[in-house]
Amino acid sequence: MNQAAQWINNHEYDAPEARRSGRLSFLKFLLRYPIFLLAFGPPIFRAPIVGTDTSQAHFDMWNILQVGWISLVALRAILRLTAAEKILIPKQVRSVLTYAMLLGLLFLISVTYSPGRVISTEYSILYFLTLICMIEFIVDVHRAPPNWVQCLFHLRLIGLLLIVLALLTLSFAPSLVVSVVPGAGIRLGGGVVAPLPVIFPIVAIISAYSFLYSLEPRVRSTSFFILGLIGTAIAQTRGAEIALFLTLAILGIGWVKYSSKRSAYLFISGFMATTLLAGVLVGAIGGESIWRTFNRGQDMGDIASASGRTEMWKFAIQYCLTHPQGMGYIAGFRALFTTSFSLNLGANVAKLGTTHNAFIDILADAGWLALAVYSIMMFKVLALGWRSAKKRTPVTLGSDDASRHAIRCFLLLFCYCMMEGMENSVFCIPLQGPFYYQNLIIAVILGASATMVASSRSQHAPFVR
């Protein structure tokens, strides 16, 4: 294995010029940092499954393909880690990884009392494979930091490719990417082909940041931003819409704070014009009609219960009050909740019963200790990204402004994932696209922060604890 890992090290796609500039073509970038391949999924074209035998749900062809995809990336990471030179990860980053490892161990322990031990074990393995990929990326970028802004644009490009794939899927299997919602019409959610309610906002956030800070031609960023907004509206996910709005508000406030007075005046003028336009629309269309459209025709009871989510949260919390260890990773809530309410989700593993809240889902998976570990870990990532975004670094990273811009934008993406995670638990479930997007975003924040900490020390000093 050491020989194989050494071969990979000696044949990396990092020519001297590429290493100096950090700019690589899209394909070479994916080969150099294959953790970004996880953002593809890969897409799964799974036909609807009829039946109730959930014991076979994880053995269909598409699941095997997806697990194989993740396993190959993780195997490459393991080989590179075995041959990598020993480094000392900064204590701030090491602390986050320690909590991530502890969380995985709690998931593994939950297998012992899970009602579906095979599924819980499988997902625990997938969790650790993803964590290995993140660790290898952090170690690798210490040796050869990438162009961090290019990481942003390549993440957006992956999202755009998945959007195109979802649109192409409409031509031969529309049921895989669209659904009909009573009172709301057709929803372009992407299904298991592409998580469009997450991809569209990510495209919009990256494009908005690029426009405000002139990281690319403004015509391009404007076009992609409009695409992200329209796509988010078509996806018809209120949590994504609210999270995108709040993230863009944070971006706008930050831009005004650090921009010139002229830029601030332009922003305030634009905000006032938008407010006036919104008032005109409300007067012309009617506030009640707009409210009904936003809430997909639901009554106040459905809105107050967050489309039934509060019942799921109540069930999970009440159960964990008497069973503080939780229900068992992934399989527990699905089995106990569906049994308690006599529900039938069928054999399709893509329809795993969840609490529709990332934090409550962690609670249901492995109890209160897991929820505490997960919350602390997420807070530490947020705090580390915030400190790094304000820090100035030497020229050793190529461009101080570029590094800080990239980490600020990834921090915004992380905030979006956390806010959207309040109504969607796919961010903490392996084999779901948003899970890999969030972990990739965390890996970039940790990797960029680690290189910034390292570069702030003397070139001859060791990689500090």
Image (spheres, helix red, strand yellow):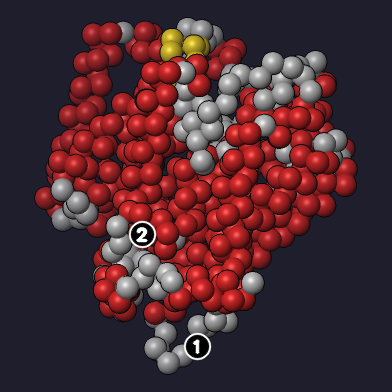
Local crowd size for mark 1, using a 10 Å CA cut-off: few (<14), some (14–19), many (≥20)? few
Disc 2 is placed on an element classified as: helix
Kind of residue indicated by mark 1 = Pro
Residue 399 image offset from top left, x and y in percent:
26, 70
Question: Which quarter of the rendered picture does the N terminus lie within?
Answer: bottom right
- The residue beneath circle 2 is 28
Residue where numbered disc 1 is placed? 462
Q: Residue furthest bottom?
A: 460
Camera-side residue of 276 and 352: 352
Residue visible at 43% across and 18% down in the picture: 172
Answer whether residue 201 is visible to the viewer in this image: no
Identity of the residue drawn at 24% across and 19% down: 279
Instruction: Identify the mark nearer the N-term, 2 or 1.
Output: 2
| x, y percent for residue 152 | 34, 53
Q: Nearer the viewer, residue 80 or 314?
A: 80
Up-down relation of residue 259 to residue 359 (above or below): below
Image depth: mark 2 or mark 1 in front: 2
Residue 50 occupies quadrant: top right
Mark 2: few/some/many CA within 10 Å (<14, 14-19, 20+): some
Q: Is residue 413 at all visible to an observer of this figure? A: yes
Q: Identify which residue is drawn at 56% across, 62% down.
A: 76
Q: Quadrant of residue 129?
A: bottom right
C-alpha gap between disc 2 and disc 1: 30 Å
Nearest the eye: 31 or 205: 31
Residue 145 sits above or below residue 375 on the image: below
Amino acid of disc 2: Lys
- Which residue occupies 58% across, 50% down? 70
- The disc at residue 242 is none
Tell me residue 424's x, y (percent).
Answer: 57, 33
Residue 418, given in percent of the width and then of the height, sits at 52, 44
Secondary structure, mark 1, is: loop
> Taking 377 as reference, is 216 left or right?
left
